[in-house]
Structures are given as structure tokens and as C-alpha cells.
């Protein structure tokens, strides 16, 4: 067994080592006075956390307020850099723990490992043919987005990665004294570089900057880690079920929104999307080129030493004649594999360039499969050539497109374009104002007519032409990059069935969807609704039922494999109705739509638009999967990976593997249980309880957010909302339409601002009222909640996320932000409500979990939060002080703004979360 105490001492050693280096750097750059100032603040905040003292608290605030530049900026950066170092140490410790599990002699599998999942499946005695069915149905799609929540620059991330690599090397027990000294010097140099690097962006990133940032993770980790996770499942199945040949499909895929998400971002043009697809293909080809050059070195077998199948020899001779010019053939005639690789490399390097290039990735796969099949004949039957198999898996996963690009746009944009088209061709003067039934009639009639609807492109407004250009671009992308390059068109703010038919009609006009004269249908794209608000989630089942009953839509689905994708938005639902109500409505919508789809014999994939933060549906991947209705997992899961989640999960190869392994193991085990009819259905008492709890929580949430006339004033003044826009972390505006209305404010700045002020109400507010009101009705109700927590994954994940939110929130620190509200009465009144609800929520959570403290079930996370809090406090105090000075100043001070932004970046690093 792993000794937790010893294990955590290794983490503390790493933190101490990095902290000592930072201390030395502070002395060098700011003198002993800077070091002493930082230490004084650190020790005071630490003591205050242990034994709160009002006088010491006031002195600390006064000391912080009296800081002047440049000392003030150095102090801010000292705490911010410390958090970056702690984050690195903790990630390194995760890698260490995984390795320690693998070294255990008792053979106990790590929780949420693929080995653990396979072991559990074997113990369940599920028949092998059903296990293969589970494998065949496995599907996890992870979609990287450019949602602006990554506060850390890529330059800083790269330094962090190098520091992590050095830290890992210190664990080598065979290090010599000289090697250790070299590592210590390297570590000092990297931490120094971190201190000397400007952490703030000086301009907003362009969309193509964001594309390149996203591609960085494919280049650094994902291209290699994805096939490794598949290989791990193959290996474990082979170990636990000997004498059986398993087929492990390509069940984990990465897609992207970056460069395709047009919703509220005018910078994502068809031209930008096209350039995105080109950049993605370039990276895929570069990675294949590197792998093929490596294989060419390895495959040195000669026909004078081994017998080579005649099929390969003939293939090489034919290809050399067709594709190679004089002097391009491999010089050694007997090295037949190298001759074949020379042809493959030539064809790969000409993809999209000349007629010599591969037209599609399947042609490359065919060549690689031929080499593998022939080469493995030289091997014993139980030995496989893993290097070429890995490349084959990579080509299957990434093709020539690298990541499938989703296109997303707002339903209103399509309606406006369709309105104009129908007006120009004299079908109806004002389509947008028609009742839904009449809209559906017009759209079905247009979709049932093989003839095009639109006149010449120039006859329409610039806005409609721009919308249509998107669909023309998709058609051209399918021809140039393959049909996998763009597979899904997402309709945000879907509120009716016509919202989806409008997209299908635009696709028809561009030739992506076609109805032939003989009635035959072609459809090159999935059309997916995005259900976001509480009202839309409730209406979702009826919206989809209307579509499923239409012949025209069913014909489209039929040629798309009877597959419907539905995206669920966690952010706007939570902003609209509070986290507890939003999560319950999401759960219910999935159940109802899934049940209905089964009646229509359709496969349904839910796309979970989760953010990184708890207020936007965040949390570990495996927990996210387990919290879904078990019966919905069989058709696969799709989840967004946003902002800082990318760097925290996919910057380091070992961490990336562990995150994907956790997700794969959770889905594998949950799907196997569903096959055995375990976990299907929902206890009626539980459902009734959640309905009551949700109703009370919704009323409480909306009474504050929508019912209190002063709430928006409080939100805008008691958080750094105004200052966030200057952080330059995304190409997308903070609100839709540049509006000041609450409805148009994006969920990211909404959550980001609350997180910074440590109030974090999007992640927990109103849950306590809902739970407490139900529990207080009778002792039986509290027992029921405790039973639900023990036996229902959805409820357990919900309660645990609430615990995490309360741990990261801090009411004492949050109270400082109410002083930013100009009207003291408003500040005091609303803050008191938030504080009372916090206490109420904490009290009921502890009763439900039966524990003394929040997160007692997760001691590592609990310790991490406790370790960080005293160091986040000074940054919050500084942030409040600086914002106050800046808002009171008649002139805009660049120095003050820079320092506010540094505190924002530092708090984000300290809480490992932005929005």
C-alpha cells in the first residue's frame, strides 16, 4: 500500500525546494527588504488562518494598502509565481503517485485506471460477446475550445513544463552528485526565467493565435498519448482475458471549436476557418512525416535475410514507377521496406500539393497495413510490432484533418438569413414573425423541393452572404480535407424545431444536403441543437420530438446513421437558474430525450458544454461522465475542454495520459454496468426529492439575481468584472452584441468575476436553501438525502462539487469586496444574504455527507486548498485596494491597471481556476 504521509512529505519537499529558490530570486532582484516584506505578509496571513485576530487583520490590510510601486508589484508577482510553482509540484506529485501504484507488489490497481475497470468487468462475469459490444459502443469525444479562461501565457506554460521535467528527474534514486548539482542549477535557471518573464499579454490573441495555442497540445502530448491509452486497454484486456482476441476501436477522439465557433465572435470568418483546417492538416502531416522517417530507420530488413511476401514487392515496384522520379528511389534494392517508405514519404509530402500526393488518409493506411502484415510474419505469433501499429492508430484517429472542427453559430443569425432569402424570392414577407407551425410548414416545403431556393449570391445583404459563405466553405472543406474535417453544425440558443431546419435549408442551398429528383437524400453534416437556458432544457424533449416525427428530418437522420447529437450548455443554465437547478434540469432533459429517441430507434449522443470552473459544470472528467444518467452513455459522450483545463490536463504527457485513462475507465465500467441493466432507471423518491429541492433552489437564486433591483449594481462593483476585459485572454468579446444587459453577458466573465472575489456564487448559491428546506421537513428526508449521496452518482458528484466550491470560496476574504460597492447599504445587505446562504449550505452538506469538515473524503485536495489559502489572501487584499484606488482616480493609471491584472492572474493560479 502507498504510505500517504510519506507520499505527501515528498510533495512538501518539492514545494519547499521551489519556495527556497523563489526566496533567493527575490533577494537578488529586490533586496532583503523585498524578501522580508513578502515573508512578513505570508506569515501574518498564515497565522490569521490558524487564529483569527481582528487587530492583526487590520494591521495586515494597512500594511498592504501602504505598499508602493515597484515593491507592490514585486509582492504581487512573488505570490503569483509561488502559485505557479505549487501547481507544478502538485502535478509532478500526481505523476509520482501513479508510478508508485504501478510499482506496488500487491497488484492493486489505481482507482479509475484502465486496469481497475477491466478487472471490475472480469469480476462481473459479463459474457465476452457483451464485453465486445461495450467496447464497440465506447465513444469519448473531447472538444477543445478557445473560451477565454486561460490566464497563463504559452511562454509561461513552456517554462512550467521544463520545471516539471526537472522535478521528475530528482526522483531518480541513481542520480550522481554531479547530476544532482546540474539539475539544481537548471531548476534555479528556469525559476529565474519564470520570474523574469512578463506574464501578461500585451494584446488580445487573434483567432489564429488561439488555433496555434490549441495545436500546441496536439503537437506536445495528444498525438502520442491517444494511441497509448488505446494500447493500454488492449494490453489489460489481453492480461485479464487470455486466449481471447479483442478488437479495441478508436474510441477517444479530440475535436475543436477553435476557428469554427462563430457565436458572438465576428473574428471567426470563413477564411479563418479555412486557414484553421490548413494548419491542422499541416501538423498532422508533420507528425506522420517524423514517424515515418523513424520507421524507415528501424525497418532495415533485407530480402537476403528474410523472406518478403511477393505482394509487398509488387506493390513497391508499381509505386516506384508511378510516384518516384529518377534518383528518388531507395538506393539499396534489397531493403524492400525502406523502398516502400520512400514512396510513402513522397506521397505524404505532396498531400494537397500535386497529383502524387495521397488523396485521403485511407490510402496511407492501406500502405501501412500492408507493411505491418508482411513484417509481422517475421515475428512469433504472440509478438507485435508496436511502433508501426501506433502510427496506424494515429492515422485512424487523426486522418489528414487532425481534429474534427465543429461549426457553431447563433440561431438568430440563421433566422435572419432565411428571412431575407424567403422575402427576396417572394415566399413570405416577414418569416421571423410567423408562428412556429407556419415556419415549419415553409421550411419542410423548401426542403422537399430538389430545386435551389436562392437567387444569385449578390442579391442578398452582406450579413446573409457571410452566413451562406460559411456553408459554401463547409462544402469545399469536405472536398479538400475530407468529410471528417467538419461533421457537426451547432445551433446555439436553440429554442424551437425551426432553428434546426433553417440550418438544414442553408446546407441544402450550399449542396451539403441534397434531395434528388428520385427522392434519394444526401446529407453531409449533423445539425445539433444547443439547449442552454432552463426554459430551453425543459422545452428540449418537445423540440426534438417534433423533428423526429418529420419525414424530411428523419430522412436526413437516416443517411447520417440515425444519429442525433444534442449539446447541453452548463454555463448559461447555471447563470439563468443556479447550479443545482441547472444540473438537475440537464439530467432530466437527457433522460427524457434519450427515452424518446429510443422509441424512434435513434442513437443519441449528448455533448456536454462544461467549462473548467464548478460554476460552469467543471470538475474531473471521470466524475463528469459518472454523473450522467447511466442509460445515456451507451451512445457515447462528448465534452468540451476549455481554457485553463487544457494546460492543467494536457500540458504534461503523464498527466494527459492519466486524465484520459480516468475518463476511459469511468465510461468503460459505467457502460458495462448499463449492459447488465445495473444503474438504469431512477428511484421515484429520489426524483421527487430533486424536483422539490430544485424548485426551492431556483426560487432562492432568481429572487437574488433577477428579483433584487440592486443585484447587478452589486455584481458590477463588488467584483473585478470591469477590469477583466483588459486581461487579453481571448479573441471573443465579453458580452454578446456588446450589450450591458445581464442576459447578454457571457457566462465566462460572470463566473470569472465571482471566482476572483472569492464569493463564487455561480458554483453553490441557493443549493443550501433547496437542500435545507427539503431536509427540514422531516428526519426521513435527511436520511433520504444521505442515501442518495451514498448510492446515486449524480447526487454524489453534485454534493461533492458543492463542497469543493465552498472550500474555494472564502467569506472572510469575500467581505472585503463589498467595500467596493459605492452604496454601503446595498453592499451590506446583499453580502449578508450571500454569507447566510454560505453558512446554510455548509451546514446541510456536512449533514448529508456525515463528515466533520468539507472534503473529508478528499484529503489531498483539502490539504491543497488549505496550503494555498494563506497565499491567495494577500492577492485578494491587494486586488481590492488597487481596484478602489483605480476607480476613485480621475485619470486612468496604466500602472494600477497592470497591478490589478497581475492580481487577477495570481488569484487564478492560486485557485487553479478562472471562469
Image (cartoon, helix red, strand yellow):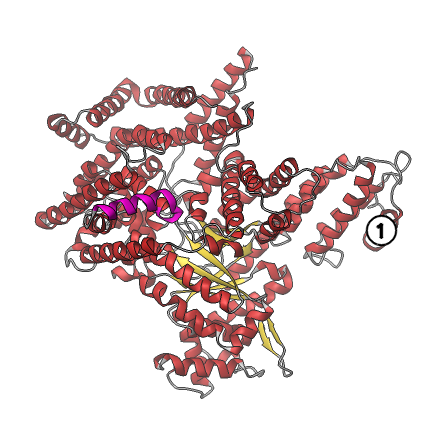
Q: Residue at x 42, y 19 (%)?
A: 6
Q: Residue at x 34, y 54 (%)?
A: 583
Q: Identify the residue position indicated by label 1 in the image.
A: 315
Q: Residue at x 38, y 36 (%)?
A: 198
Q: Position of residue 203 (x, y in %)?
A: 39, 47
Q: Position of residue 706 (x, y in %)?
A: 20, 60
| Looking at the image, residue 448 lies above or below residue 638 | below
As drawn, the residue found furthest toward the bottom would be 426
As drawn, the residue found furthest toward the left would be 825
As drawn, the residue found furthest toward the right would be 304
* Magenta span dominant secondary structure: helix
Q: Nearer the viewer, residue 48 or 805?
A: 805
- Secondary structure type for disc 1: helix
Q: Position of residue 379 (x, y in %)?
A: 80, 36
Q: Nearer the viewer, residue 682 or 279?
A: 682
Q: Is residue 683 magenta?
A: no
Q: Is residue 174 visible?
A: yes
Amino acid at each position: 500500500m502507498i504510505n500517504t504521509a510519506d507520499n505527501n512529505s515528498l510533495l512538501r519537499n518539492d514545494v519547499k525546494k521551489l519556495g527556497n529558490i523563489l526566496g533567493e530570486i527575490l533577494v537578488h532582484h529586490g533586496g532583503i527588504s523585498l524578501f522580508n516584506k513578502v515573508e512578513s505578509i505570508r506569515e501574518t496571513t498564515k497565522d490569521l488562518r490558524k487564529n483569527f485576530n481582528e487587530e492583526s487583520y487590520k494591521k495586515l490590510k494597512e500594511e498592504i494598502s501602504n505598499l508602493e510601486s515597484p515593491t507592490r508589484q514585486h509582492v504581487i508577482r512573488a505570490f503569483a509565481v509561488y502559485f505557479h510553482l505549487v501547481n507544478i509540484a502538485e502535478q509532478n506529485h500526481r505523476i509520482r503517485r501513479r508510478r508508485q501504484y504501478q510499482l506496488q507488489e500487491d497488484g492493486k490497481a489505481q482507482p479509475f485506471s484502465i486496469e481497475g475497470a477491466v478487472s471490475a468487468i472480469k469480476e462481473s462475469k459479463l459474457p465476452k460477446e457483451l464485453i465486445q459490444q461495450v467496447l464497440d459502443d465506447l465513444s469519448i469525444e473531447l472538444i477543445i475550445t478557445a473560451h477565454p479562461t486561460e490566464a497563463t501565457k504559452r511562454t509561461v506554460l513552456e517554462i512550467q513544463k521544463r520545471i516539471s521535467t526537472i522535478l521528475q528527474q530528482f526522483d531518480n534514486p541513481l542520480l550522481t552528485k554531479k547530476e544532482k548539482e546540474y539539475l539544481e542549477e537548471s531548476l534555479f535557471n528556469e525559476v529565474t526565467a519564470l520570474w523574469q518573464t512578463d506574464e501578461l499579454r500585451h494584446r488580445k490573441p487573434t483567432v489564429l493565435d488561439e488555433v496555434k495555442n490549441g495545436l500546441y497540445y496536439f503537437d506536445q502530448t495528444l498525438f502520442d498519448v491517444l494511441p497509448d491509452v488505446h494500447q493500454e486497454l488492449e494490453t489489460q484486456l489481453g492480461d485479464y482475458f487470455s486466449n481471447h482476441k479483442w478488437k479495441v476501436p478508436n474510441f477517444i477522439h479530440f475535436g475543436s471549436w477553435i476557428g469554427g465557433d462563430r457565436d458572438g465572435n465576428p473574428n471567426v470568418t470563413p477564411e479563418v476557418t479555412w486557414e484553421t483546417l490548413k494548419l491542422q492538416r499541416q501538423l498532422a502531416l508533420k507528425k506522420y512525416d517524423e514517424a515515418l522517417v523513424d520507421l524507415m530507420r528501424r525497418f532495415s530488413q533485407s530480402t537476403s535475410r528474410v523472406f518478403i511476401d511477393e505482394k509487398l514487392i509488387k506493390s513497391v515496384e508499381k509505386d516506384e514507377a508511378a510516384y518516384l522520379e529518377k534518383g528518388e528511389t531507395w538506393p539499396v534494392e534489397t531493403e524492400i521496406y525502406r523502398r516502400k517508405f520512400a514512396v510513402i514519404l513522397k506521397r505524404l509530402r505532396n498531400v494537397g500539393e500535386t497529383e502524387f500526393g495521397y488523396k485521403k488518409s485511407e490510402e496511407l493506411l492501406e500502405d501501412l497495413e500492408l507493411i505491418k502484415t508482411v513484417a509481422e510474419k517475421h515475428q512469433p505469433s504472440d509478438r507485435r510490432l508496436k511502433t508501426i501499429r501506433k502510427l496506424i492508430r494515429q492515422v485512424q484517429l487523426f486522418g489528414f484533418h487532425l481534429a474534427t472542427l465543429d461549426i457553431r453559430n447563433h440561431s438568430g443569425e440563421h433566422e435572419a438569413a432565411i428571412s431575407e432569402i424567403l422575402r427576396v424570392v417572394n415566399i413570405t414577407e416577414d418569416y421571423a414573425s410567423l408562428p412556429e407551425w407556419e415556419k415549419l410548414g415553409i421550411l419542410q416545403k423548401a426542403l422537399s423541393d430538389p430545386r435551389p431556393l436562392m437567387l444569385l449570391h449578390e442579391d442578398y445583404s452582406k450579413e446573409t452572404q457571410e452566413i451562406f459563405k460559411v456553408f459554401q466553405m463547409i462544402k469545399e472543406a469536405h472536398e479538400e480535407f475530407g468529410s471528417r474535417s467538419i461533421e457537426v453544425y451547432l445551433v446555439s440558443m436553440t429554442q424551437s424545431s425551426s432553428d434546426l431546419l433553417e440550418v438544414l435549408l442553408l446546407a441544402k442551398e450550399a449542396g451539403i444536403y441534397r434531395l434528388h429528383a428520385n427522392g434519394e437524400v444526401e446529407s453531409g453534416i449533423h445539425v445539433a441543437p444547443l439547449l442552454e437556458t432552463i426554459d430551453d432544457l425543459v422545452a428540449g424533449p418537445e423540440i426534438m420530438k417534433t423533428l423526429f416525427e418529420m419525414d424530411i428530418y428523419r430522412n436526413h437522420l437516416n443517411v447520417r446513421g440515425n444519429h442525433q447529437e444534442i449539446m447541453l450548455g452548463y454555463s448559461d443554465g447555471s447563470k439563468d437558474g443556479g447550479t443545482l437547478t441547472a444540473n438537475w434540469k440537464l439530467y432530466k432533459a437527457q433522460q427524457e430525450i434519450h427515452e424518446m429517441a429510443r422509441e424512434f430507434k435513434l442513437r443519441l449522443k449528448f455533448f456536454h458544454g462544461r467549462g473548467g470552473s464548478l460554476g460552469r459544470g467543471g470538475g474531473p472528467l471521470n466524475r463528469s461522465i459518472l454523473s450522467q444518467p447511466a442509460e445515456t452513455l451507451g451512445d457515447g459522450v462528448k465534452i468540451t475542454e476549455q481554457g485553463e483545463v487544457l494546460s492543467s490536463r494536457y500540458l504534461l504527457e503523464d498527466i494527459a495520459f492519466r486524465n484520459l485513462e480516468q475518463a476511459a475507465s469511468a465510461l468503460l465500467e459505467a457502460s458495462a454496468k448499463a449492459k447488465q441493466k445495473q444503474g438504469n432507471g431512477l428511484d421515484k423518491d429520489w426524483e421527487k426529492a430533486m424536483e422539490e429541492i430544485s424548485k426551492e433552489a431556483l426560487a432562492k437564486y432568481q429572487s437574488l439575481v433577477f428579483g433584487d433591483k440592486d443585484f447587478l449594481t452589486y455584481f458590477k462593483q463588488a467584483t473585478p468584472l470591469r477590469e477583466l476585459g483588459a486581461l487579453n485572454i481571448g479573441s471573443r468579446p465579453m458580452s454578446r452584441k456588446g450589450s450591458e444587459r445581464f442576459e447578454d453577458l457571457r457566462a465566462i466573465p460572470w463566473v470569472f468575476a465571482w471566482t476572483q472575489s472569492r464569493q463564487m456564487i455561480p458554483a453553490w448559491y441557493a443549493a443550501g436553501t433547496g437542500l435545507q428546506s427539503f431536509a427540514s421537513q422531516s428526519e426521513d428526508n435527511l436520511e433520504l438525502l444521505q442515501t442518495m449521496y451514498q448510492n446515486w452518482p449524480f447526487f454524489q458528484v453534485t454534493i461533492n462539487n458543492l463542497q469543493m466550491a465552498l472550500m474555494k470560496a472564502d467569506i472572510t476574504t469575500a467581505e472585503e469586496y463589498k467595500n467596493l460597492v459605492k452604496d454601503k447599504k446595498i453592499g451590506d445587505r446583499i453580502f449578508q444574504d450571500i454569507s447566510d446562504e454560505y453558512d446554510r449550505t455548509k451546514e446541510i452538506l456536512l449533514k448529508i455527507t456525515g463528515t466533520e469538515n468539507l472534503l473529508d473524503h478528499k484529503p489531498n485536495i483539502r490539504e491543497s486548498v488549505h496550503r494555498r489559502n494563506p497565499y491567495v489572501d494577500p492577492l485578494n487584499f491587494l486586488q481590492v485596494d488597487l481596484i478602489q484606488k483605480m476607480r476613485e482616480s480621475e485619470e486612468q493609471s496604466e500602472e494600477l491597471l497592470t497591478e490589478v491584472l497581475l492580481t487577477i492572474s495570481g488569484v487564478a493560479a492560486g485557485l487553479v481556476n478562472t471562469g
